[in-house]
Image: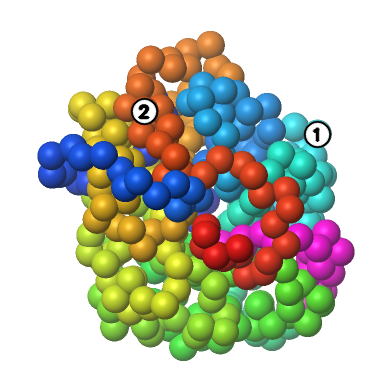
Amino acid sequence: MMCRKILAVACLVLVVLACAGPPLITAKAETNQIYWGAFVGTTRMGYLPNLESFESAVGKDVSIWNWIQAWNEPDRDNVAAGYYDCSEFNVTTMNQCRNNGIIPMVSWAPLPPQSSESYFYTPTMQDILNGMEDSYLTAWGQAAAAWGHPFFVRLFWEFTGSWDGNFYALSNPAQFVQVWKYVVNKVRAAGANNVSWVWCPADVGDSVATLQSVYPGNNYVDWVATDVYPNQGQGMEPEVTNIHTAFPGKPMMLAEVGYNGNNMDSWWNNFLTNVLPNQYSYIKAVVLWQDNEVSGPTPNSPSFDVTKLAGFQKGISSDYYSLHVYSNLETSPIPTIGSF
């Protein structure tokens, strides 16, 4: 899997600083300033009952729901859950989002097969440029256009991480930029102008110059992002500041955030009510990653312990974080809160 999720931990996670933050102060008085969301469950595509259990456990509804779609893969997880081919545009889950006022975020890329999965292939960047994925990209774009509502696509996420295989951008920055533009152009040519494209490098301390070398340009990127996992040595800095320095005109999200450690209650509460609103006010969306492999049992598991969520529950209850009220959102690219 493109993401480097290797730790099995015991509870729900939310990003915090790698070291102790400043004294706790209350979040800014402004309300509904930031989208918040989650990836919840053990299947790539996500499962609505897991999300609803999570929302019930934390006491607040999400505004973004993230899931993964692998290109050309009949995903075993989705077959088991009764879904169709993972690679297809999933109208069912998109409608579940829309009907519940949630904005979909599809993390979308060719992923390598596991050892037992020999029935699909992972294209290279050159394969894409050679047109080998054209029919798939066109069909996916046509389906997205037919659905017709705004949603995020996090394309080739964590592409500056060395674990990213065929789409490790730093192996050939110019080619990566070319491939990004090629994919976006194909999807747009199919009529899908309702996609907000999220450019999400890995949190590996990329310099401003490195980030600029793999940036496709403002016409091909709507939001910038990164994934933050302090337990794996990937904290807020320097990645977040460098991205904002390189592209100050783009809204930023933390597209995956995760942490488990000592004093979690105070860390979560400090992050949500102090660090994020007061030190990183330009971050306009934060998305939790929570699954069995990374963050402990899912919310509908008997071993899920809601008492370990107290700090997160308290912090996310702030009106600073908007719940799901987006059934009527029709603006694309998706704006930051307060501008529509």
Q: CA distance from mark 2 to mark 1?
A: 35 Å
Q: Residue furthest top?
A: 302
Spot occupied by residue 110 in the image (x, y as percentages of width and height)? 62, 62
Q: Is residue 95 above or below residue 47?
A: below
Spot occupied by residue 13 in the image (x, y as percentages of width and height)? 38, 34
Checking the image for residue 314, the label placed there is 2
Amino acid residing under circle 2: Lys
Amino acid residing under circle 1: Gly
Magenta region includes residue 1: no
Q: Nearer the viewer, residue 303 or 251?
A: 251
Q: Nearer the viewer, residue 334 or 50?
A: 334
Magenta region includes residue 140: yes
Checking the image for residue 82, the label placed there is 1
Checking the image for residue 271, the label placed there is none
Query: The residue tagged with tag 1: helix, strand or loop?
Result: loop
Mark 1 nearby-residue class (10 Å; few <14, some 14–19, many ≥20): few
Q: Nearer the viewer, mark 2 or mark 1?
A: 2
Instruction: Tell me the magenta residue range.
Output: 132-155
- Residue 129 is drawn in which quadrant? bottom right
- Residue 153 is drawn in which quadrant? bottom right
Q: Residue at x 65, y 83 (%)?
A: 182
